[in-house]
Amino acid sequence: MQRIILHLDMDAFFTSCEEKVNPSLKGKPVVVGADPKNGMGRGVVSTANYEARRYGIKSAMPISRAYRLNLDAIFLPVNFSLYNEFSATIMRILKEYSNKFQQISVDEAYLDITEKANDFEEAKKLALKIKYEIMDKTGLTCSIGVASNKLIAKIASDHNKPDGLTMVRQEDNRAFLENLNARKLYGVGPKTEFKLRALGIKTIGQLAAFSKEKLIDLFGVYGLYLHLSANGFGDDFVAEEYGRLSIGREITFEENSDDYRKLNDATEEIAGEIFDELQQEECLYRTISIKIRLYDFKTFTRARTLKHLCNDKDTIINSAKELCREFYGDKIRLIGIRVSNLEEFKGQKTIEEFCPTFS
Ligand code: TTP
Ligand code: MG
């Protein structure tokens, strides 16, 4: 049975949230990234709004480079709790449209709407309704792709950004992909692109027409994947919704540090962000883990599982600090904290109500 898959991706998500809560930013080039220090920091760009992208500023670029590209851009630090709040509203809206819902990242999700729309015309109406509802409830725009599988739906949502809606019927899969750069295929990065170029392949159409056997010879199973996806075949399974498995954050220090106070400060900062997200998601946790990366990139993880589910910030901080103690005096490059073994709050107000044996 042919399925109808919808992929939604918010437009310039982090900066759009910032503009929504601070409308004076609208129309100006805005860049969100860790440690911005007005463009002088050591962090990288998380995202840039479309005005800033005109200057060539993009995700993953060092902040210092973005600053050189546009001295007038406004640089903002990353405010995860704000984006999580918007994200939770958006995901709640989406879940109302289908229980076959799969959240991929903070601003991106798939919906299987086969049972909600008889054909692509109805699917288009549904997609527009989703766009209007998201605009109405959050004031943000998104781009949607609707197709017969996840691969094409994702490429389609990116096809006409921002505020786009791109429909690709199954019979049009090949034509839609024909002239797109092979890099648009999920999993094709710079290395594969380089190898494909050496074979004279630049577009997905050229990849589709290339010998399947030769691709398998050169790339193994991945070659078969390349052949099938270039020809428009892809996975169309959207799992029924399941809860979050874990919530985590990391901080890379500006300079490697053996100062335990810096480690403790970072622990408190990260724990605060994780706690905000736990509250957003209405989750309790049982396991706290830390990740420590040393100056030479040696990486260690340690974990503690509590007897009971827990919902407070101090337990995250205290457990993480205790687990970190082993690394006092080491030159540390990165610290990460994660809580897992999550369970939904189920409406209870306090931990005592949820778990009467606690305390
Ligand atoms: P994307 O959806 O890739 O980008 P975007 O929403 O900012 O812009 P677009 O309109 O092109 O979809 O990522 C969603 C958010 O994830 C983005 O706003 C910031 C964050 N992010 C990073 O922190 N680092 C990254 O390298 C990327 C790509 C995204
Ligand atoms: Mg996006």
Image (tube, rainbow, N blue to C red):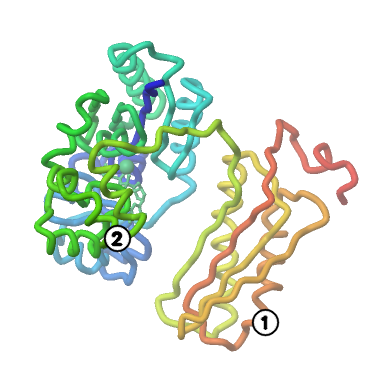
Percent from the top left, x then y, of residue 283? 66, 42
- Seen at 58% across and 78% down, the residue is 261
- Binning the other alpha carbons within 10 Å of mark 1 as few (below 14), some (14 to 19) or many (20 upward) gives few
Beta carbon at label 1 within 8 Å of ligand 1: no
Q: Residue at x 50, y 27 (%)?
A: 100
- In the displayed structure image, the side of residue 166 where residue 323 appears, left or right: right
- Label 1 secondary element: helix
Q: Is residue 192 left or right of residue 91?
A: left
Are the two marked residues, 1 and 2, in contact with CB atoms closer than 8 angstroms? no
Secondary element at tag 2: helix
Tag shown at residue 219: 2
Residue 320's spot in the image, x, y percent?
Answer: 66, 67
> In the rendered image of this protein, does residue 121 appear above or below residue 190?
above
Question: What is the three-letter code of the residue carrying label 1?
Answer: Glu
Question: Could you say which disc has been placed on residue 326 in the image?
Answer: 1
User: In this picture, is 150 found above or below 70?
Assistant: above
As measured in the structure, the alpha-carbon distance from the residue carrying label 1 to the one carrying label 2 is: 44 Å
Q: Which residue lies furthest to the front in this view?
A: 213
| 62 or 272, nearer to the observer | 62
Q: Which of 52 and 114 is in front in this view?
A: 114
* Residue beneath the point at 36% across and 55% down: 221
Q: Position of residue 264 (x, y in %)?
A: 60, 73
Q: Which badge, 1 or 2, comes first in the chain's sequence?
A: 2
